[in-house]
Image (cartoon, rainbow, N blue to C red):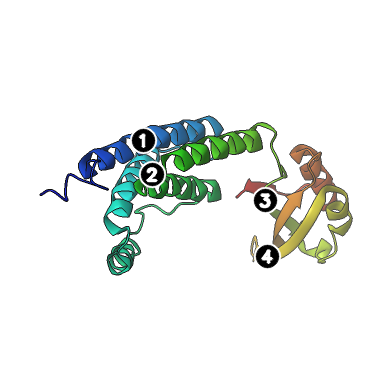
């Protein structure tokens, strides 16, 4: 029992573990506040926010358990590798926040509290400024579907439109419709930043005899 309550002869192991969990909780709350502030996805989830906090705290305890024991570390992380999210994480930034929380939990679990605090605030400021100044901003990939009369059917019909309005484009599918009297082309495109979707659609309608055109954001 003496070794349970002593580290280096004068500090309580339980106290240090509780301190690590407390600091991790506070820092992970800071992380989730930044996540909420910078969230730009389609599906916000309170459960995801709670998961970041819970995983950070659990990992801080795990790091305390496995520190100095490589065999136990490999065994526990092998178990963690079997864990899967019930819902797939579709936003790459969400993955970054998960790793952010885990890194803070691991650092606190090794009692590197100063490093954990520095990491939290430096990375939080970095994430916020990336969001605030919209670094790397560009149009998302879109799915463009164009219906063309059979008598106008040729693959280069929209080349001049794509040169004017898009950064890049790729033909993904060709299919017949309306009993074979029309052709539907499906493209994956990235519009130029200054392009208005309505202008693009109007220009295409001039080419396809004013038939159906749809533009879907992925």
The mark lying in front, picked from 1 and 3, is 1
Residue 102: image location, x then y, percent? 41, 49
Left or right position of 95 against 53: right
**Circle 3 residues within 10 Å: few <14, some 14–19, many ≥20:** some
The mark lying in front, picked from 4 and 2, is 2
* Separation of marks 1 and 3 at Cα, in angstroms: 43 Å
Left or right position of 14 against 207: left
* Separation of marks 2 and 1 at Cα, in angstroms: 7 Å
Residues at marks 2 and 1 touching, judged by CB atoms closer than 8 Å: yes
Residue 81: image location, x then y, percent? 35, 64
Asked which secondary structure carries label 2, the reply is: helix
| Earlier-in-chain disc, 4 versus 2 | 2
Compared with 78, 117 (above or below) is above
Q: Name the residue under label 3.
A: 142
Residue at 42 percent across and 35 percent down: it is: 27
Q: Can residue 40 be seen in the rendering of this structure?
A: no
Asked which secondary structure carries label 3, the reply is: strand
| Earlier-in-chain disc, 3 versus 4 | 3
Residue 22: image location, x then y, percent? 31, 34
Left or right position of 3 against 143: left
**Mark number for residue 23?**
1
Compared with 34, 3 (above or below) is below
**Mark number for residue 108?**
2
* Separation of marks 4 and 2 at Cα, in angstroms: 48 Å
**Mark number for residue 172?**
4
| Earlier-in-chain disc, 1 versus 3 | 1
């Amino acid at each position: 029992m003496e070794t349970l309550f002593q580290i280096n002869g004068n500090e309580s192991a339980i106290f240090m573990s509780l301190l690590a969990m407390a600091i991790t909780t506070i820092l992970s709350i800071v992380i989730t506040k930044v996540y909420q502030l910078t969230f730009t996805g389609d599906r916000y989830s309170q459960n995801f926010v709670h998961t970041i906090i819970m995983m950070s705290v659990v990992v801080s305890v795990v790091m305390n358990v496995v520190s100095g024991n490589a065999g136990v570390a490999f065994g526990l992380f092998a178990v963690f590798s079997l864990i899967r999210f019930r819902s797939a994480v579709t936003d790459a930034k969400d993955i970054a926040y998960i790793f952010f929380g885990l890194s803070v939990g691991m650092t606190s679990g090794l009692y590197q509290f100063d490093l954990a605090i520095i990491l939290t605030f430096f990375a939080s400021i970095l994430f916020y400024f990336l969001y605030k100044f919209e670094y790397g901003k560009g149009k998302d990939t879109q799915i463009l579907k164009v219906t063309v009369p059979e008598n106008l059917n040729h693959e280069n019909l929209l080349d001049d439109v794509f040169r004017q309005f898009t950064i890049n484009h790729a033909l993904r599918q060709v299919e017949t419709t309306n009993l074979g009297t029309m052709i539907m082309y499906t493209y994956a495109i990235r519009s130029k930043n200054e392009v208005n979707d309505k202008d693009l659609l109007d220009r295409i309608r001039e080419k396809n005899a004013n038939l159906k055109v749809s533009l879907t954001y992925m």
